[in-house]
Image (cartoon, rainbow, N blue to C red):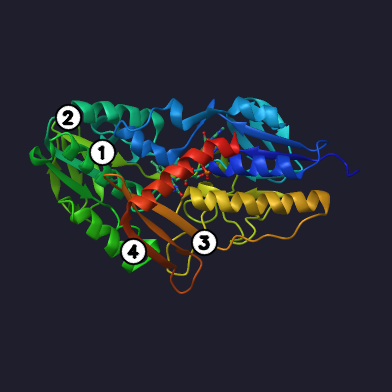
Amino acid sequence: MSAPKTVLILGGGVGGLVAANRLRKALPSQHRVILVEREASHVFAPSLLWLMVGARTLPSISRGFERLKRKGIDVVRGEVEAIDPERRSAVVSGQVLQGDYVIVALGAEFCPEAVPGLAQGGHTFCTPVGAEALRVALEEFKGGRLLILTAAPAYKCPAAPYEAAMLIEADLRRRGLRDRTQIDLFAAEQGPMGVAGPDVSRGVRAMVESMGIGYHPEHQVVAVDPGARRARFSNGVEAGYDLLVYVPGHRPPRAVAEAGLVGEPGGVSVDRHTLATRFEGLYAIGDVTSIPLKLGKPLPKAGVFAHAQAEVVARSIARAVTGRGQPAEFNGHGECFVETGGGKAGFGSGDFYAEPVPRVTLRGPSRFWHAGKVLFERTWLWRWF
Ligand SMILES: Cc1cc2nc3c(=O)[nH]c(=O)nc-3n(C[C@H](O)[C@H](O)[C@H](O)COP(=O)(O)OP(=O)(O)OC[C@H]3O[C@@H](n4cnc5c(N)ncnc54)[C@H](O)[C@@H]3O)c2cc1C
């Protein structure tokens, strides 16, 4: 019997949740798997878009972390305040936790305050609280100018603002308000889902514009005046609104930055195949990482990558502990559904590690892909809790 080991997983989002489950299954019971998380519940983020238009409730897309204890995962509810990468330890709400292996899966922190007035003047669907508030605001909206904007050129889930625009458009149509509403999407980036290549970008833009949504790329918002209901952009353009919906920018969590783990701008530097950091036994996965691609942009922050990276790291650690199993590598494959409203979705998939540019294809909207997304949602919480 090998000496008992402890795997300390920081963060119970997509990456941490998958890693904890996989490790608990792979490791004999004398080894500990500790999952540290500040929230009481895990929320399935893709469904926040449906929550925003009243098609889901928060309880239906959440599960309490307590349930993981039944599987033998030690859940520690608390705030990761500091990380010591050399010692593989973390301070969690004042208590020091130590691991033989550490997986940093703390995600990326939203920073709407980077744009003055944005949080006060608008609503975001990117957090559970924000999506609930936006649902109410949309219910009360009776027509006018609806502005959707991305507050930075890179953000979590490159498809999300485009899906949001199309879902809101479909919802307003269903409620008979579309004729009374002008919808404009102001994007800080050059075009939709740029990392996926020009064909995908053109395809998503065509989907959005075919719904009569005005699309304005390369508009970086610099300030919002909540009183006057106006957004100002760095190129001098100003736009008034009746309802403002935004995707905030993000930054690495404070504890990660203070630990000196942030190498690449925007995240922790890791080996792109093993997710190992430069510290022995310490891995980072998901949105907290920054993996540069040949085309000059980093790998997008998306759950599909956090999930696949968690599988790889769990297998590597299980192999190191037990001496069993095959080595695994993250290969950059990714896929995502693109909800277009009216019970339809498109589907993009491909190799994001392909060089010189990612090779990604986009399938057009159909009921089939929407059903695929619903099925994925249904199985996610059941599978991991
Ligand atoms: C609206 C929306 C829709 C999306 N749709 C998709 C989609 O369709 N497909 C897709 O692939 N991706 C999608 N994403 C992106 C996806 O949710 C993220 O990329 C994914 O969750 C990243 O996983 P992660 O484990 O790296 O981080 P997260 O899932 O963000 O998890 C980080 C966890 O760490 C916890 N934490 C952070 N700091 C601390 C601390 N100091 N102490 C304790 N706990 C802490 C957080 O509470 C959180 O639970 C979407 C995102 C949003 C917002």
Q: CA distance from mark 3 to mark 4?
A: 15 Å
Residue at 66%, 55% (x, y): give it.
276
Looking at the image, do the residues carrying marks 1 and 3 touch, with CB atoms under 8 Å apart?
no
The amino acid pointed to by label 2 is Phe
Q: Which residue is mark 3?
A: 333
Q: Earlier in the sequence, mark 4 or mark 1?
A: 4
- The residue singled out by tag 1 in the image is 245
Which residue position holds label 4? 200
Residue 75 locus on image (x, y percent): 65, 29
Look at 59% across and 53% down and name the residue there: 309
For marks 1 and 3 on the same chain, the one whose residue lies earlier in the sequence: 1
Pointer 3 with pointer 4, Cβ within 8 A: no
| Circle 1 residues within 10 Å: few <14, some 14–19, many ≥20 | many
The answer to whether the residue bearing label 1 lies less than 8 angstroms from the nearest atom of ligand 1 is no
Q: Nearer the viewer, mark 2 or mark 1?
A: 2
The label number, if any, that marks residue 141 in the structure image: 2
**Cα separation between marks 3 and 2:** 40 Å
Q: Is residue 73 above or below residue 212?
A: above
Q: How far across and down, in percent of the image, does residue 27 sit?
A: 77, 43
* 366 sits to left or right of 141: right
Name the element at disc 1.
Answer: strand
Q: Report the residue that reaches farthest toward the left.
A: 180
Nearer to us of marks 1 and 3 is 3
Q: Residue at x 61, y 35 (%)?
A: 82
Whether residue 87 is visible? no
